[in-house]
Image (cartoon, rainbow, N blue to C red):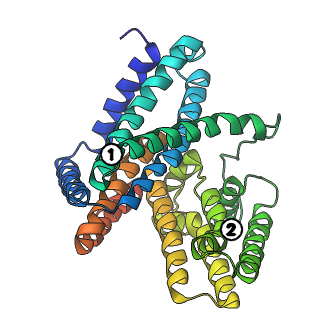
Amino acid sequence: MANRLIRYDTALLRRALADAFGGLRDMLLLALVAVIGVAWLRQQMLSAPPDAVWFAALAGPAGFAWQRLARRRLARLAEHSPVAAAALDASQRRAWLIVAHLLLGLPLLIAALLLGIAAGRPLTAIGLATAAYVAGTGLASVLPMLWWRPGQRRSSPSVVPPGRRGRAVIAMILARQTRGVRRPVLRAGLLLLASFLLTVLAGRWGGGLPTPLNFALLLLPSVVVLLLATRLDAALLGFLPSAGYRPGFVALAVSALPAGSCLAGITAFLVTGQGPGLIALLTLAHLVIALINVARAWLYPDRTRSSVDFQLQLEAAGLAATAILLPPLAIAAVGWRFWHYYSHCRAKRWMQA
């Protein structure tokens, strides 16, 4: 394999798998989740209504997210890696992107084909998945050209200032999440206020719209805040335990913005008279994001961002499939994994805060 980018990332992928699932218990859990997932897919693919073919359009968001990740990965390789020269070569970048999209695109097309066969419309499913994937990838390639502004990128501070250390750390985490280092607490408050007001407006004016569109408008402000809340500073969070901060404080700090967003959304739903089902859905979405943030923060010490995110993506997919089939088993697995994450973070704490 002559392409240095592909060889380099292949080696890193092997090391990430060994790092994330090196223990026997981790491998057994991964195998169990894989077996359950395959069994569930086989059961679901046996029969499906004709309208189920529209699920193939989910390849669009997948292509969008994958293209964004690929572009960011290439940018990192060009800035800080032993293969920076190769990452700047146009032909090697194209080959790397082709391989990256084949790794995701082929399984998605196979899944779309199986769905189409079960629904009796295989050609429609393949065409829809292909068009959606290409559209998502193209959109992810065009948007950075529209959003980019010179001189806007700022790095968050990496040293905890003296005095009121806990509040300062929370402010630094909020600065990363709100995309600004000036008055991050005030920015977070204004963001939550805007989310509340927009949700109230959507509830007041969206009553005449179809139910799915009305739900989408009601949830959109909270979804935007949740997307911002997933922005975490891996270097800062990896440093906190060694500076004496407890895992509980770290969990509280990374969950502050999702918790505030959940409170703002629930208040807006109560003001506009929304039902308990939608409130429960909103709460569940915020809880999931908060738990993912906590898991990432507890695993970052002595780990790279890419290896942590890769591990959690695999575990989240497996737990989602398990929850559909056996919810009690999924709950037990979540509890066990979070105890593992907590133990990892606690083991890195050596100073007294």
Residue under label 2: 221
Q: Is residue 89 visible?
A: no
Rendered image quadrant of residue 177: bottom right
Distance (Cα) linking label 1 and label 2: 32 Å
Label 2 neighbour load within 10 Å: few <14, some 14-19, many 20+: many
Query: Residue at 50% of width from left, 60% of height from top?
Result: 293
Of badges 1 and 2, the one in the foreground is: 1
Q: Return the mark for residue 174.
A: none
Question: Position of 91 compared to 205: left or right?
Answer: left
Find residue 139 and report its horizontal and vertical position in percent. 64, 39
Q: Quadrant of the N terminus?
A: top left
In the image, residue 43 above or below residue 98 = below
Going by the numbered disc 1, the residue's amino acid type is Ala
Find residue 97 and report its horizontal and vertical position in percent. 50, 25
Query: Residue at 46% of width from left, 54% of height from top?
Result: 296
Q: Quadrant of the C terminus?
A: bottom right
Query: Residue at 60% of width from left, 74% of height from top?
Result: 215
Label 1 neighbour load within 10 Å: few <14, some 14-19, many 20+: some
Question: Position of 57 compared to 204: left or right?
Answer: left
Question: Position of 311 compared to 191: left or right?
Answer: left
Q: Earlier in the sequence, mark 1 or mark 2?
A: 1
Residue under label 1: 111
Find residue 221 and report its horizontal and vertical position in percent. 68, 68
Going by the numbered disc 2, the residue's amino acid type is Pro
Query: Residue at 61% of width from left, 58% of height from top?
Result: 227
